[in-house]
Image (tube, rainbow, N blue to C red):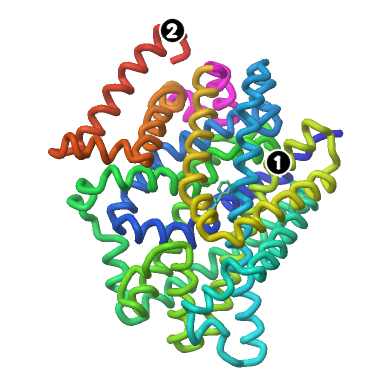
Amino acid sequence: MTRETWATRMGFILAAVGSAVGLGNIWRFPWVTAENGGSAFLLVYLAIVILVGVPGILGEFVIGRRSGRNPVGALRELSGSKAWGLVGMFSVLTGVVLLSFYSVVGGWILRYFVESVVALGTAGPAPYFTDPGPYYDSLAFTTDAVLYHVAFLALTGAIVFAGVRRGIEIGTKVMMPAILLLLVGLAVWASQQPNAAAGYAFYLSFDLETLQANFFDILGPAAGQALFTLSLGAGTMVTYSSYLGDDRSLPFDATTIAILNTFVGVLAGLVVFPLLFSVTGEAGGSGPGALFVSIAGAFARLPAGTLIATAFFGVVTLAALSSSISMLEIPVSFLVDEFELSRPVAVGAMVGLVAVTGGVNALRPALFEFVAGPLVDSLLTTGLIAFLLFVGWVLGTDAVEELRKGAGSVADALSTPWLFAVGVAIPLFLVFTLLSSLGVGGLAAGVVPVSSFWLTIVLTLTLTGVAFLGLRSSRSVV
Ligand code: PHE
């Protein structure tokens, strides 16, 4: 069976941006930002997107395009070792875990969307307008939530079932422009609401003191959020780039994807924060219900609320779908490549599995919060560390050769520092963030209270330097 490829360059970029732009930007980002101090968090997060995200996407792209395989087959074939294939299995697992909570949130969103449309049709207020808090409580983590989760999953399955070109590519080509247009419209509208300025201040003002005081606490969640929003560490980018031809410039595509995703993320913040502040006067509390309760409450108090709410939940449904399909495509491509299952059978099997695992999440709030936060953060971080070490130490010069294909002189200049970054600096940094989210950072900050912020920077640089020398003497890849 010949493997599918993207029909157009734009198709690939839009699909990858569609994967990146999702609930991570609109639902998780405001929640995590609000919990971690607003603008200070934004700054660390943006730095990680640029310094870790772009080289990281490139790392996954190199693996995917060079092998033309799913993450398991890719690592096994490129290394010639079954053990690396097992490492690739980690991606398949991560894809399933991700989808098992994502589809639950997708279900909540779908429900708000459906109810907004119904309200619009009957010209009444949306049902969640009167008491947004209790309304959210009455539907999240109930059997209804399981039903909507399954409905959302079925939509995801239908697109992936249709295949790479007819499903994923065409689907995202329609969804992405719609998302952008609606978000820009909503951001302009939000800016005119009373007290919007307080939202901008919380979101955008630069504050070095908060940053220094909370650096360790911010680091783990910021790295987790950066990877999550860029769809990194799960093998999505490996999988999508495995359908890519040799004539595309990987550095160009990776940068475009990171820029567009950040643009949409920041734009979503420009919709969400002014609205939250204009209605509640604060960032909207914390936890996964924040968006639903506060945004829904905001819409209720504003003119033409139902119409705006319909547009908003419509956008979010599309954004969630264009990401969930990329999660499902990881295990599906694995089953199709490795077991030669037909696409419909592979999709059916995975949808069946996630219907159950997601159903459990949909009923248990404590489990859900663990999966959606710490579990996903650590799976993605560990996954990305593995991919990047593979690129730096197993592929080495082959990775550079792959990077240069179709990329011209930019890649020539960038390849050595890039290989060093993915082989050494970024994995070290990621190990560090993993430890700091496990609380080790807090400990260090207690022992050395003076300026743990600068201490971290110096330590990371020193370790990086040492490892660089080690790498240089053990293999002449950099
Ligand atoms: N990037 C997606 C979002 O922000 C989530 C995602 C993570 C998708 C990992 C695929 C892989 O919603």
Within 10 angstroms of label 1, few (less than 14), some, or many (20 or more) residues? many
Question: What is the quadrant of the C terminus in the image?
Answer: top left
Tell me: residue 41, above or below residue 86.
Answer: below
> On the rendered structure, is 90 left or right of 339?
left
Q: Given this view, does label 2 or label 1 mark the residue nearer the observer? A: 1
- Indicate which disc, 2 or 1, sits on the residue closer to the N terminus: 1
- Distance Cα–Cα, label 2 vs label 1: 36 Å
**Dominant SS in magenta:** helix
- Residue sitting at the far bottom: 123
> On the rendered structure, is 439 left or right of 73?
left
Tell me: residue 99, above or below residue 250.
Answer: below
Three-letter amino acid code at disc 1? Pro
Residue at image location 48% in from the left, 79% down from the top: 132
SS assignment at label 1: helix
Q: Which residues are magenta?
A: 394-415
Tell me: residue 22, above or below residue 418.
Answer: below
Depth check: 42 or 364 in front?
364
Residue at image location 71% in from the left, 54% down from the top: 356
Q: Is residue 256 visible?
A: no
Q: Residue 375 in magenta?
A: no
Residue at image location 62% in from the left, 69% down from the top: 142
Three-letter amino acid code at disc 2? Ser
Question: What is the quadrant of the N terminus in the image?
Answer: top right
Quarter of the image holding residue 406? top right
Residue receiving disc 1: 331
Residue receiving disc 2: 474
In percent of width and height, residue 9 lies at: 65, 44
